[in-house]
Image (cartoon, helix red, strand yellow):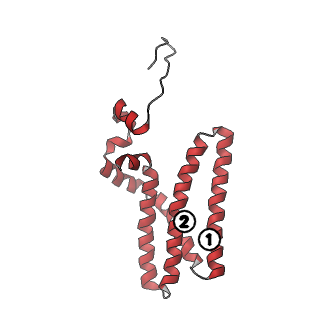
Amino acid sequence: MKEKWIEHYTLIELWIGVLIFGMLIEAVLLTAFDEKMYHSAGLLIGLAGAILMAAHMEYTIGRALSAGEAGAEKTMRLGYLLRYFTAALLMIVAAVSGWANPITIFAGLMTLKLSAYIEPYTHKISEKVCGKEVFFREMVSAEEQDRLYGKRKETEDPADGSQT
């Protein structure tokens, strides 16, 4: 579990932020508005969308990093457009069908933006949970780095031709 947390710590920290803001918004919805299910359904759909969008962003960034310079820009642009149009489609379907509030769907989706702002604070919590040293590879032994991040490639030292 700890290894998965370390491998995807930014994603998990964003998810934590989404859930924190989701709970705050839900508390407001439950106390301030009638038709609680209508508003709450929209918020839950938006929160699920935000969680999936964060995961898709991590996936897209990973693909873009291995796609080369020209491919990276195209990959990132296509990923953004897919997320944007999916969010718009969700709100349009909700508005036309009337089964959820499109404004609370939007509020749920925006929790991803808000969670990005508090990510430095959720990162401090992650450091306390996992131990600060695991976030800094220089502080982890080579064997531990190999176990957590995979084997390092052997590189040749150009000065003496030896491998490190």
At 49% from the left edge and 17% from the top edge, which residue is drawn?
Answer: 157
At 41% from the left edge and 61% from the top edge, which residue is drawn?
Answer: 16
Residue 159 vertical placement versus 105 (above, below)? above
Q: Residue furthest top?
A: 160
Q: In the shown orientation, is residue 132 left or right of residue 78?
A: left
Residue 67 vertical placement versus 162 (above, below)? below
| Residue bearing the label numbered 2 | 49
Q: In the shown orientation, is residue 33 left or right of residue 60?
A: left
For label 1, count other residues whose C-alpha is less than 10 Å away and answer few (under 14), some (14-19) or many (20+). Answer: some
Q: Residue furthest bottom?
A: 34
- Proximity of marks 2 and 1: CB atoms separated by less than 8 Å: yes
At 38% from the left edge and 39% from the top edge, which residue is drawn?
Answer: 136
What amino acid is labelled 1 in the image? Answer: Leu
Residue 123 vertical placement versus 106 (above, below)? above
- Image coordinates of residue 148 in percent, x first then y, are 39, 39
- Image coordinates of residue 155 in percent, x first then y, are 49, 22
Residue 13 in which image quadrant: bottom left
| Residue bearing the label numbered 1 | 90
- Image coordinates of residue 125 in percent, x first then y, are 34, 54
Q: Quadrant of the C terminus?
A: top left
